[in-house]
């Protein structure tokens, strides 16, 4: 006889959710144990049609499609690591998306995204790239620089590099920086899809993004970045890609992080994806760009 560890009310909710989703209850309980999330938080996540693709195969008790445990894996790791000052969990299509305020280089994921210029690895001299090198990821810079030396990179390209860092073993270099006010939204949408495709092809289960397009040289507001990134995630979900996503709003600028967190959370909660591209509405601050690029990789 199995003794429930959840208490009668929570145990009843577990059973109700399992029945509604066609999931074996024991599998659901294992997923809760493995997720790293509190029981209430886990059930809140899964009660909102966030695992609509998870179903029993009708013949056995095995779960078909995205396994319950991997779905909650990244959110649980982030919670356990203490990397998030603030955290929200939602989904885009069938892809779980965790939005946090924190630091990308402290985020546990199979890969982190490093936005890059066309043609070279110079973006490692500032912003996200410099933070990754500072956290021990110089191997990713060296690998990407070697790639750029023999390959002409263009917007939308991605390149998977080893990082040498246990917390995030890979970096997905993504060419998005400097696409310009008219093109940046579409470039980021398309590149988001390419990033998730590259991750899935490599067998990776989780990727953490910065808010692409919102950096010093970026021309997107955080609301536009949220739309562009979630459009790309929605396309990946439609194509059956199964990679969990985190979006990290940089805690080093609290006001911008709070605004970004609100915009990403609102966009994901609204659940409307695939809208038309937009012209960037964010201005370019030359003085901030110069300050951000005073230290270059040598």
Image: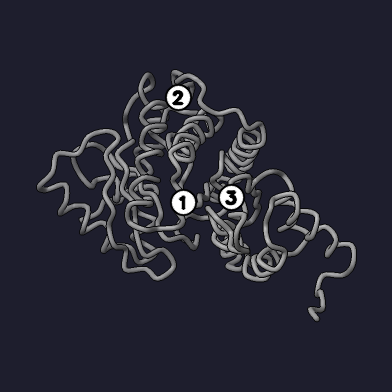
The spot of residue 259 in percent (x, y) is 62, 37
Depth check, front residue: 270 or 126: 270
Residue 142 appears in the figure: yes
Give the colouring mode of the picture: one colour
The spot of residue 155 in percent (x, y) is 27, 33
109 over 240 or under it: above or below: below
The residue positioned 60% from the left and 59% from the top of the image is: 59
How far apart, in angstroms, are the residues tagged by discs 1 and 2? 32 Å
The spot of residue 89 in percent (x, y) is 64, 49
Crowding near pointer 1: few (<14 within 10 Å), some, many (20+)? many
Residue at far left of view:
150
- Numbered-mark total: 3
Are the two marked residues, 1 and 3, in contact with CB atoms closer than 8 angstroms?
no
Residue under pointer 1: 243
Residue under pointer 2: 283
Camera-near label (1 vs 3) is 1
The residue positioned 62% from the left and 63% from the top of the image is: 79
Which dot marks residue 98? 3
Query: N-terminal of the two: label 2 or label 3?
Result: 3
Q: Is residue 149 left or right of residue 170?
A: left
Q: Is residue 47 left or right of residue 108?
A: right
Q: Is residue 285 left or right of residue 12?
A: left
Query: N-terminal of the two: label 1 or label 2?
Result: 1
């Amino acid at each position: 006889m199995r003794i429930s560890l959840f208490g009668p009310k929570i145990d009843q909710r577990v059973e109700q959710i399992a029945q509604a989703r066609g999931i074996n209850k024991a599998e659901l309980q294992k997923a809760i144990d493995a997720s790293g999330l509190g029981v209430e938080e886990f059930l809140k996540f899964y009660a909102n049609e966030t695992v609509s693709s998870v179903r029993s195969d009708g013949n056995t008790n095995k779960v078909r499609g995205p396994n319950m445990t991997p779905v909650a894996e990244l959110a649980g790791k982030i919670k356990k690591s203490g990397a998030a000052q603030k955290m929200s969990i939602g989904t885009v299509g069938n892809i779980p998306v965790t939005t946090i305020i924190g630091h990308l280089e402290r985020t546990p994921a199979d890969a982190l995204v490093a936005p890059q210029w066309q043609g070279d690895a110079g973006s490692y001299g500032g912003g996200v790239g410099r933070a990754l090198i500072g956290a021990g990821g110089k191997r990713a810079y060296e690998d990407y620089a070697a790639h750029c030396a023999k390959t002409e990179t263009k917007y939308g390209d991605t390149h998977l590099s080893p990082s040498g860092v246990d917390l995030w073993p890979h970096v997905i270099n993504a060419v998005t920086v400097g696409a310009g006010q008219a093109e940046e939204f579409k470039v980021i949408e398309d590149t988001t899809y390419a990033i998730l495709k590259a991750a899935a092809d490599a067998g990776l289960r989780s990727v953490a993004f910065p808010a692409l397009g919102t950096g010093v040289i970026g021309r997107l507001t955080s609301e536009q970045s949220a739309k562009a990134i979630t459009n790309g995630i929605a396309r990946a979900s439609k194509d059956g890609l199964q990679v969990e996503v985190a979006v990290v709003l940089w805690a080093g600028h609290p006001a911008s992080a709070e605004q970004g967190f609100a915009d990403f959370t609102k966009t994901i909660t609204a659940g409307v994806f695939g809208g038309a591209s937009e012209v960037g509405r964010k201005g370019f601050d030359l003085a901030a760009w110069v300050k951000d690029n005073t230290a270059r990789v040598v």
